[in-house]
Image: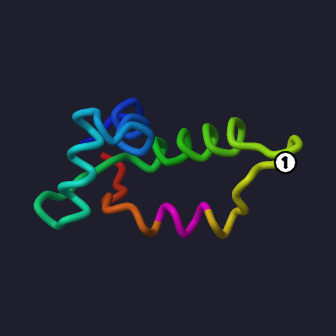
Amino acid sequence: MLSTKDLVHAIFDGNSDAGKLLVKATMGEIELFSAPKSWNAILWLITNTLKADGVPVYTGSQLGELKASLPIVWRAD
C-alpha cells in the first residue's frame, strides 16, 4: 500500500521509486493500493499550491477525473 508520501512522489516525481511503480501500474504490470485519506492529502496539495491569481487551477470535476485516471485502487485498511 502506498503511503501518502509515496503517493506524492509517484504523482509529482516520475524518477522516484514510487513514480516508477506508478508507470508500471499504468502499463498493467502491477496493482497499486492507497488509502482514500492519501488522496485527500493530494487534493489539499494541488488546490493549495497550484493556483493562478489566487484561484485553484483545477476544478473539482477535473480533480475527480485525475483521481479516476490514476491506476490506483483506493481502499481503507
Q: Residue 66 colored magenta?
A: yes
Residue at the location (23% across, 53% down)? 32
The quarter in which the N terminus is drawn is: top left
Q: Position of residue 71 (x, y in %)?
A: 31, 62
Q: Say whether residue 51 is left or right of residue 19.
A: right
The residue located at (39%, 61%) in the rendering is: 70
Residue nearest the observer in this picture, 14 or 21: 14
Q: Quadrant of residue 40?
A: top right
Is residue 10 shown above or below 22?
above
Going by the picture, which residue comes out furthest to the top? 5
Identify the residue position indicated by label 1 in the image: 55
Residue 23 shown in magenta: no
The percent position of residue 15, horizontal first and vertical second, equals: 29, 36
Badge 1 density bin: few <14, some 14–19, many ≥20, Cα 10 Å = few
Q: Is residue 7 above or below residue 27?
A: above
Which residue shows up at 64% across the image and 40% down it? 44
**Under tag 1, what secondary structure?**
strand
**How many numbered discs?**
1
Left or right of 75 in this view: 24? left
Q: Is residue 6 left or right of residue 61?
A: left
Q: Residue furthest left?
A: 29
Look at the picture and state if 34 lies above or below 27: above
Magenta part mainly helix, strand or loop?
helix
Q: Which segment is the magenta one? A: 63-67
* Residue 64 spot, x, y in % from top left: 57, 66
Query: Please, what is the three-letter code of the amino acid marked with disc 1?
Result: Val
Position of residue 18 measured from the top left corner of the image (x, y, whole percent): 27, 38
Q: Quadrant of residue 11?
A: top left
- Left or right of 31 in this view: 7: right
As drawn, the residue found furthest toward the right would be: 53
In percent of the image, x 84 and y 48: which residue is there?
A: 55
